[in-house]
Amino acid sequence: MSLQDPDQIVVVGAGLAGLAAALAAAPRKILLIAEAPLGEGCSSAWAQGGMAAALSPGDDPAFHSRDTIQAGAGLVDPDRAILLAREAPLAVRDLADLGAPFDRTPDGGFAQSLEAAHSHARVARMGGDQAGQAIMAAAIRAVREASHITVWTGPRLTGLLQAAGSQVSGVIVTEDGRETQIPAAAVILATGGIGGLYAVTTTPAGLLGDGLALAALAGAQIADPEFVQFHPTAMDLGRDPAPLATEALRGEGARLVNASGQAFMAGYHPQGDLAPRDIVARAIHAEREAGRGAFLDARAAICTHFPVMFPAVFAACQSAGIDPRIEPIPVAPACHYHMGGILTDAQGATSLPGLLAVGECASTGIHGANRLASNSLVEAAVFGRRAGRLARTLTRAPTPLQTSLRLQPLAPQGLRQLRQSMSRHAGVIRDREGLTALTQIIDALIRSEGQAGALVTARMIAQCALDRLESRGAHFRTDHPEPAPLASRTIFTLKAGDFARMAA
Ligand code: SIN
């Protein structure tokens, strides 16, 4: 297939959402573009827990949807939550049919783990903590075998093409300093999250929110960018990215303790170690700030079974000289997931014709202010497939190209300053003073470096966090510690010149 086919659908990003969209769009011709080799550079492959789906007797999509809504702290769209919960079991079965080796019960059902804020053991897992790798391997195999998909790895997304009426009509990508314009009938952004905007992340650090920034600059509606999830139990090994100690460990009975060995979560929430993720992250932050330290103690609950039950966590511990069978694992919150993103409908369509968004860069209304554990891979599969089906039907813009929008690169020194500043001022705990300082730091960086994707996305996060005068889910303000009486989403469109003004 020629890269210049104007009737093709371009999918940018090859995490599970991008792959699911590309597969579901058959027989439509798909050009799948990813900067890293397939299976690398995306958070999906790093997922440990698995896919939340009501698959066991006694569970029901209504319970899954209720837990999703409750964890989301008032901002989850209930229709989308039930849609996800109803389609989740099928998404798991489809991946199993593609060869994903889910752990099974003796009677052939799906073995399921309990994770925080789930009312049932509902997370379909693989090889204990290998879900992301195994699911991605199955999906990648299917993509490689699909004759309608052409894969192009190497180039980075650096711009968007738009025709009259703002219809997105292609992408600009750059590889080895060479820019290429690629026309498309529609573009599906599957560009992932924003972990690389923070000093320590559990995701690949190259995820800088470029897709989100481009969509915003092109005029797409953006939702809830202030809601950033910090995983409570990233391993505190002085590494970035930080390896994860999956929540499933606490589902199996591991306890959070401080340096004196005292279990502390009961003092913070009635659900103790299995409280919602934002609450556990703040509790760990508080223990550490108070000088008591935070550790995950799996000695009694998992003990000698550790290497078999959680091989990825065990290997990460070993690489740092820690033996979790006989000593607790040091943990600290780290940036893990972006609940906000490009606003979409239930088919992945954004407010701009010709532009769809799936996976972490999208805001489907599922995650609200705080994503429920193991809802991300399942959302990627369900909404990726929906977007692929919609893309089959889309036709190219009737008018020729009118504008091209480009991101500027960000120098390593600027990115370092941004990451430190985001962690300091827009992290687990926020306030007006810090967020105001952050907006000024980012504006100064935009003046010196230009309109880099990381800066545009960070600026939206900082501004919306500053404007949200309440605490809700993952957004906690010490100067506004209570939730507002009415929960409302942040939904906005950048206007022409907004960024120039912010940075002036
Ligand atoms: C985990 O296994 O703790 C992470 C799963 C998720 O982010 O949903």
Image (cartoon, grey):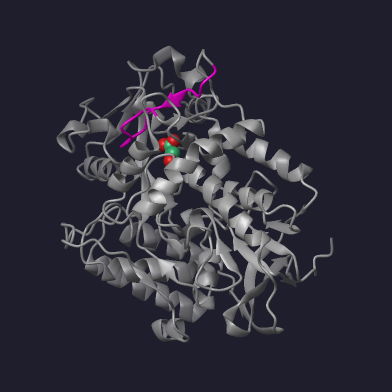
Q: What residue range appears in magenta?
A: 108-121
Tell me which residue sits at (80%, 65%) in the image: 3
> Looking at the picture, does residue 320 appear above or below residue 481?
above
32 vs 179, nearest the viewer: 32
**Is 80 on the left-hand or right-hand side of 355?**
left
> Looking at the picture, does residue 138 appear above or below residue 254?
below
**Is 281 on the left-hand or right-hand side of 374?**
left
What secondary structure do most residues of the magenta stretch adopt? loop
* Residue 438 seen in render: no
Tell me which residue sits at (66%, 36%) in the image: 137
Tell me which residue sits at (60%, 48%) in the image: 15
**Is 414 on the left-hand or right-hand side of 255?**
right
Q: Quadrant of residue 210?
A: bottom right
Q: Residue 206: image x %, image y %?
A: 56, 55
- Quarter of image, ligand 1: top left
* Residue 313 seen in render: yes
Q: Is residue 3 part of the magenta span, yes or no?
A: no
Q: Residue 171: image x %, image y %?
A: 67, 70
Quadrant of the drawing holding the N terminus:
bottom right
Q: Quadrant of residue 226?
A: bottom left
Q: Residue 86: image x %, image y %?
A: 45, 41
Q: Residue 504: image x %, image y %?
A: 41, 87
